[in-house]
Image (cartoon, helix red, strand yellow):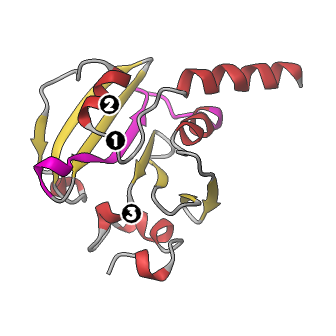
Amino acid sequence: MKNLVALLIVVLSVFNAFAQPGRSVEHCNRIYGRPSGPKTSMPTETVGNPPARVSCFYSWRGFTVMALFGGRDASDTRCISISFWHTGSPLTGTEIDGILAANADGSSWTRVEDGWARADNRALAVTVFKQQRLEIFTPDFYRKDPPGYLRAVLQSLPAHLQPK
């Protein structure tokens, strides 16, 4: 039991610096370092997502991190989706728990059908590709016609926050 507690403390300390949905590009750059490629506009609608204003990829502590930024206008650019994965191996339950805890923003996460919902309804999370990737996103990122793999987790939101 002591070993499990010690392992959990180490894992959570590794993840305590994760950026959270709603943060700026500059905040993510402070957490993850320089993006591993140029900051680009990304036609994410080609992979089932709404278009993001900016996307950044980072190589950080053994993870590839993809942050998508959007907002109402250029002065409102904020993180609307952030994904974590390893190359070639699924995320462990401990890693997922640590990432979610680091992205709680003072709230808690609840397991819902096909994912997790944050108690403040400001973020949702799903694993995709057989737990190869964890995606944390703001519900307003998928205001219209979300991809099928997100529908169940989005339905966990109160009716007035669900996509139309």
Residue underneath mark 3: 139
The range drawn in magenta is: 73-94
Q: Which of 8 and 107 is in front in this view?
A: 107
Res. 162 image quadrant = bottom left
Sequence-wise first label, 1 or 2: 1
Residue underneath mark 1: 23
Amino acid found under the numbered disc labelled 2: Cys
Sequence-wise first label, 1 or 3: 1
Looking at the image, is 19 positioned above or below residue 80?
A: above
Q: Total marks drawn?
A: 3
Name the residue located 59 percent from the left edge and 60 percent from the top edge: 119
Amino acid found under the numbered disc labelled 3: Pro
What is the spatial separation of the Cα atoms under label 1 and label 2, in whole angstroms?
7 Å
Question: In the figure, is residue 26 to the left or right of 125?
Answer: left
Q: Do the residues labelled 1 and 2 touch (CB within 8 Å)?
A: yes
Locate residue 78, reporting x and y percent.
27, 46
Residue underneath mark 2: 28
What is the spatial separation of the Cα atoms under label 3 and label 2, in whole angstroms?
20 Å
Query: Does dot 3 land on a helix, a strand or a loop?
Result: helix
Query: Does dot 1 land on a helix, a strand or a loop?
Result: loop
